[in-house]
Structures are given as C-alpha cells and as structure tokens.
Amino acid sequence: MSKYSDEFKIKAIQMVLEGNSVKYVCRILGMPDSRPLRDWLAHYNHEGKVKRTQPGRIPDQVLKNSLIMSNFLGAYRQ
C-alpha cells in the first residue's frame, strides 16, 4: 500500500498546477521529500492522469477532468 492516499496525491498535484512550487507544497503538506510529488507530476504530465494506488477506484478521466476544472476555476478566483 502506498504511503499517500489518492486524494492526497490529487491535492498535491492541484496545488502545484495552481502555481505553488513543489518545495512549498511539500512543506505545507508535511512531505519530508519532494521526490514522490515530482514523480506524480511527471506521470501526470506524461500520461495526463494521476497514477492511482488502487486501480479501478476512480476512472482516470474523472481525475483528469477534476484537475483541469480545478485549475481552470482557480484562474478566475484570483
């Protein structure tokens, strides 16, 4: 089992997509190492989806749409 939940990964990626630095996100979320977040981002940027810890739990397209919508709405909230 992964140390971080799928929801945690999505939140961390969303924070970076909203313009926060990886270092800042890791500090805020209490991650002692930035490597996992960098790996999640690389996977997201390459595949367009979040690598899940439990396959079949949430469809990839739902996760992708959630991240895209959050990023889109975030631009208008500022």
Image: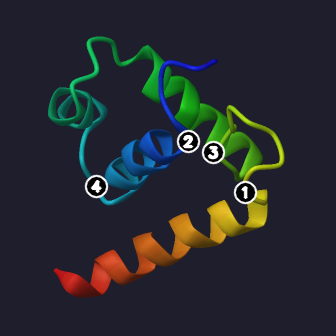
| 1 vs 4, front mark | 1
How far apart are labels 4 and 2 at the CA level?
Answer: 21 Å
Q: Quadrant of the C terminus?
A: bottom left
| 4 vs 2, front mark | 2
Q: Which mark is residue 45?
A: 3
Q: Which amino acid does label 4 sit on?
A: Gly
Q: What residue type is labelled 2?
A: Asp
- Residue 29: percent from left, percent from top: 23, 34
Query: What residue is shown with label 2?
Result: 6
Going from the N terminus, do you reach mark 2 or mark 1 first? 2
Task: Please say if the residues under marks 4 and 2 sit with CB atoms less than 8 Å apart.
Answer: no
Q: How crowded is mark 4: few (under 14 residues within 10 Å), some or many (20 or more)?
A: few
Q: Is residue 13 left or right of residue 56?
A: left
- Residue 21: percent from left, percent from top: 25, 39
Q: In this view, does 1 lie above or below 18?
A: above
How far apart are labels 2 and 1 at the CA level?
Answer: 9 Å
Would you identify the image quadrant in which residue 35 lies?
top left
Q: In this view, does 69 lie above or below 39?
A: below
Going from the N terminus, do you reach mark 2 or mark 3 first? 2
Q: In this view, does 50 lie to the left or right of 11?
A: right
- Residue 5: percent from left, percent from top: 51, 35
